[in-house]
Image: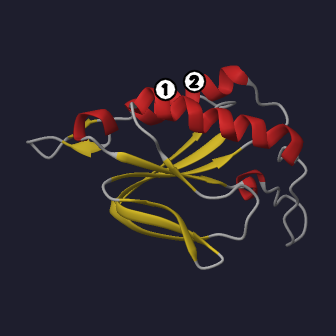
Amino acid sequence: MRAIIQRVTEASCTVDGQVTGVIANGFLVLLGIEDADGTEDLEWLAQKIVNMRIFSDENGLMNKSLTDIDGNILLISQFTLFASTKKGNRPGFTKAARPDKAIPLYEAMIEQLDILLGRKIETGIFGADMMVSLVNDGPVTILIDTKNKE
């Protein structure tokens, strides 16, 4: 799994003119799922997301997590995070999991984040043409790959 975590002061997702998710202070998380992903990837990544300390404390240092600031999550499925750009100029997406594998993992991630955060997270709609708006705070943007745990 790959996740791009963006610290935001606000973010929203709209599909066909209807708002599917909106948050104030928190994380916009773009989530890509590949065929090799499983429950271990999901659990590790969910813990990282909720406990990532990238919010400022009283001294302006990044020491606070989502739970510390009572922050929110907007989770958006993003298969293009597994784009292969090695050959040519048109990206390939063969590493991205097909919907029959990705949807259950995406739904399990929603459930896991709900539990870890202690409240319902906001989402987009898997596979939909989504319009995502955000105000990136900082900007702070973190890339996490469960197969490359740096």
Name the residue at the left extreme. Answer: 58
- Neighbours of disc 2 within 10 Å: few (<14), some (14-19), many (20+): few
- Residue 44 disc label: 2
Disc 1 to disc 2: CB gap under 8 Å: yes
- In this picture, residue 58 sits left or right of residue 8: left
Rendered residue at 61%/35% (across/down) = 109
Name the residue at the bottom extreme. Answer: 17
- Quarter location, residue 42: top right
- Neighbours of disc 1 within 10 Å: few (<14), some (14-19), many (20+): some
- Residue 148 disc label: none
Q: Which residue is mark 1?
A: 47
The amino acid on which the numbered mark 1 sits, given as a three-letter code, is Gln
Rendered residue at 69%/30% (across/down) = 147
The secondary structure type at the circle numbered 1 is: helix
The scheme the figure's colours follow is secondary structure
Q: Position of residue 21 (x, y in %)?
A: 50, 60
Rendered residue at 23%/41% (across/down) = 69
**Quarter occupied by the N terminus:** top right
Q: Position of residue 62 (x, y in %)?
A: 25, 41
The amino acid on which the numbered mark 2 sits, given as a three-letter code, is Trp
Q: In this view of the protein, which residue sits in the foreground, 150 or 113?
A: 113
**Quarter occupied by the C terminus:** top right
* Residue 69 is at least partly visible in this image: yes
Against 5, residue 14 (above or below) is: below
Rendered residue at 30%/54% (across/down) = 25
The secondary structure type at the circle numbered 2 is: helix
* Residue 34 is at least partly visible in this image: no
Q: Position of residue 74 (x, y in %)?
A: 49, 53
